[in-house]
Amino acid sequence: MGAGFTSGQEVLQFFTSLGAMGLAAIAISWVIFIYFTYMIYKVSKEQNFKDPYDILEYYCGKILGRAMVWYIVALMYGVYLIMITGAGATINQYYGVPISVGVWAMSILTLVTVVLGIEKLINIIGVIGPVKVLFIVVVCAPSLFVLLSSPTVLSEVDRILPTLAVKKAASNWALSGLLYPCLYVMTAVPFMVACGVAATNIKESIIAGIAGITGFMISVFMLVVAELVNIQAIAGKQIPTLVIADKVSSSLGVLFSILIILCIYSTACSFLWSVVRKFAEDKTKKSYILATSLAAIGMFFGEIIPFDVLVNTLYPPSGYVGIIFLVSIIIKQFKDKYGTASKNDSTTG
């Protein structure tokens, strides 16, 4: 569960912006997530990939597979840029601090962490996943009760949505539901492959992966419901979850703002390190120069491009690239299944 999700902005654009049909889009995303998880875990264990990115060549072929590897590297830097911009948006929206202060502070903090190689700090902060889930449940539960007690809420949301300034990731609910898991898989491929390869029992590993995806999608559902119920309050806001949390309790709003910053820090460090590591070994002069250059570029663009604009510009196209990967998996699966059957038939004949 990334910082983009915790902010509420990506969920707003992929699901909430579609009104009641956004809930149907969640169901599509859940099914596709499960398919991705099953296929990636299964083939990773069978093929025992030495490099997690080898799965891209396995499914997409050498040329397209390599192109996807470099696209993912570029996407990782894009996510880093989104994270530091999100830091600026968070402290600006909740504390009134200039966006540039948050952008610069997060850029410098992540740069120092990556340069010094403080992986343990990133790992410690990275385990706050259960805390994020708990906060989402606490923040969104009141809105779920409102929806259950007032079924007309959704029709009212559909009526007023066209009048609000809410960006959309896609033009219709089915496409949006398809794009969301394809986007996530593009950034999670290395981790998913590593999990599949390391699994001692692939069946249990797949079940655990599917359970994790289901839990995540339940969180998505709850957050979408909360945003729908509070659509007028969050329209035009960079960090919708802060508005919702603050309506529940001002103290909860403060705690949630801190949680978002920690999530952003963890995600930004991980992605900046991943990009630098692709080109240079840790703690070398080359890695220092590259990390500093990437952080400086991030500072520049993070100040001038709004958080919601970056999410809307970078995430949907990445989902389309993920669709190419999804289609490649389906084609490979079809060829392996029916191609082998045809060979067996011809041999028998």
Image (cartoon, grey):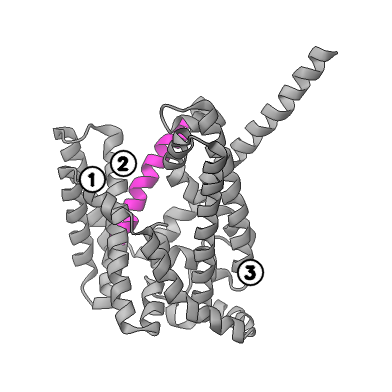
Name which residue lies at 53% across and 52% down.
181
- The magenta region covers 64-85
Say whether residue 76 is left or right of residue 348: left
Q: Is residue 74 magenta?
A: yes
Name which residue lies at 59% across and 67% down.
22
Q: Mostly what secondary structure, the magenta segment? A: helix
Residue 4 in the image, given as x and y percentages of width and height: 39, 60
Amino acid type of the residue tagged 1 in the rendering? Glu
Residue 23, compared with residue 54, is above or below; it is below
Q: Is residue 33 visible?
A: yes
Q: Which residue in the protein does label 1 denote? A: 119
Q: Which residue in the protein does label 2 denote? A: 274
Among numbered discs 1 and 3, the one appearing first in the sequence: 3
Helix, strand or loop under label 2: helix
Q: Is residue 324 visible?
A: no
Q: Is residue 265 magenta?
A: no
Amino acid type of the residue tagged 3 in the rendering? Met
Q: Which residue in the protein does label 3 denote? A: 21
Among numbered discs 3 and 2, the one appearing first in the sequence: 3
Name which residue lies at 51% across and 59% down.
215
Quadrant (top left/top right/bottom left/bottom right) for the N terminus: bottom left
Name which residue lies at 16% across and 39% down.
288
**Between marks 2 and 1, how big is the CA–CA gap?**
12 Å
Say whether residue 289 is left or right of residue 253: left
Q: Residues within 10 Å of mark 1 (few under 14, many from 20)?
A: few
Say whether residue 307 is left or right of residue 148: left
Q: Quadrant of residue 246?
A: bottom left
Q: Are marks 3 and 2 in contact (CB under 8 Å)?
A: no
Residue 77 in the image, given as x and y percentages of width and height: 33, 47
Mark in front: 2 vs 1: 1
**Between marks 3 and 2, how big is the CA–CA gap?**
36 Å
Q: Are marks 2 and 1 in contact (CB under 8 Å)?
A: no
